[in-house]
Image (tube, grey):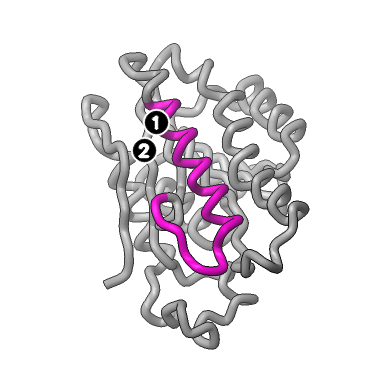
């Protein structure tokens, strides 16, 4: 069984479909889903920026659905903001979704998964290893997510739990609808970006490796 956050559209939606097509039972988590069973999916509603809601979500999953074999921590937000126009409030908003949410999700599920092993995949970004203009807040949150990944990998080493950070470059999804990269000069146009299916296929590759194989970090980008 796999649990995918931010699974209503974009990369998360495509990951959920790829895992379901491969035969997994998939729990999709997002704010905009309608709760209930929908074909191959069990859909749950949760605002990943609300740590109390994430705590309730993980308790409900363990109690009524069971312990996942795979977590894909994908939910995130992205806004390109020049540093001098950035605000502390915006930092808090992105940290809540991009870092606190994944932390709360892992905290709620990993102890139960530890008893039998499993896989935790965090969807990072090329911005989790590199800084870019107009990207100070987003990069800070993704660097934090990478730190969480590396710390969990070290702490759970030898437990049977495996951890992978998948760091895609620019990917053409609706997240770019309000950014208009073609007009920004320093960002490639959307036609030359990765597709959500590219990232989902990489996640499926990681998820289908044998239990003795650990892929610590998978970085991918457009040609």
**Vertical position of residue 41 compared to residue 169: above or below:** above
Can I make out residue 34 in this image?
Answer: no
Residue occupying image coordinates x 42% and y 79%: 188
Instruction: Pinpoint residue 141: horizontal percent, then vertical percent.
Output: 57, 48
Left-right relation of 132 to 61: left
Magenta stretch contains residue 130: yes
Q: Which residue is mark 2?
A: 164
For the view shown, which residue lies furthest in the front direction?
A: 84
Q: Residues in magenta? A: 129-153
- Looking at the image, which residue is at 57% across and 56% down? 138
Which of 18/164 is in front? Answer: 164
Q: Is residue 76 above or below residue 183?
A: above
Q: Quadrant of residue 137?
A: bottom right
Residue 163 tag number: none
Q: Give the dominant element type of the magenta stretch: helix, strand or loop.
A: helix
Q: Is residue 30 visible?
A: yes
In the picture of the structure, the residue carrying the numbered disc 1 is 119
Q: Secondary structure at mark 2?
A: strand
- Image marks 2 and 1: residues in contact by CB distance under 8 Å: yes
154 and 43: which is toward the camera: 154
> Label 2, label 1: how many angstroms apart (C-alpha)?
8 Å
Residue at 29% over, 39% down: 208
Q: Earlier in the sequence, mark 2 or mark 1?
A: 1
**Is label 1 in a helix, a strand or a loop?**
strand
Q: Residue at x 49, y 33 (%)?
A: 148
* Residue 58, above or below 147: above
Q: Is residue 11 left or right of residue 62?
A: left
- Mark 2 or 1: in front is 2
Figure quadrant of residue 48: top right
User: How many residues crowd mark 1 within 10 Å: few (<14), some (14–19), many (20+)?
Assistant: many
């Amino acid at each position: 069984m796999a649990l995918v956050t931010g699974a209503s559209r974009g990369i998360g939606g495509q990951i959920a479909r790829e895992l379901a097509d491969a035969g997994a039972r998939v729990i999709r988590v997002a704010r905009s889903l309608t709760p209930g069973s929908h074909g191959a999916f069990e859909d749950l509603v949760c605002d990943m920026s609300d740590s109390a809601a994430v705590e309730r979500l993980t308790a409900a999953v363990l109690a009524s659905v069971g312990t996942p074999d795979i977590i894909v921590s994908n939910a995130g937000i992205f806004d390109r903001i020049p540093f001098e126009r950035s605000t502390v409030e915006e930092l808090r908003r992105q940290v809540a979704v991009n870092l606190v949410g994944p932390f709360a999700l892992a905290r709620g599920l990993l102890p139960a998964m530890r008893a039998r092993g499993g896989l935790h995949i965090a969807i990072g970004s090329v911005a989790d290893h590199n800084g870019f203009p107009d990207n100070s807040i987003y990069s800070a949150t993704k660097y934090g997510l990478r730190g969480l990944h590396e710390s969990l990998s070290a702490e759970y080493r030898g437990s049977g739990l495996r951890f992978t950070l998948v760091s895609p470059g620019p990917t053409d999804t609706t997240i770019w609808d309000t950014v208009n990269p073609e007009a920004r000069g320093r960002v490639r146009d959307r036609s030359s970006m990765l597709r959500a299916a590219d990232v989902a296929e990489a996640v499926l590759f990681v998820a289908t490796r044998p239990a003795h194989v650990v892929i610590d970090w998978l970085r991918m980008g457009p040609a």
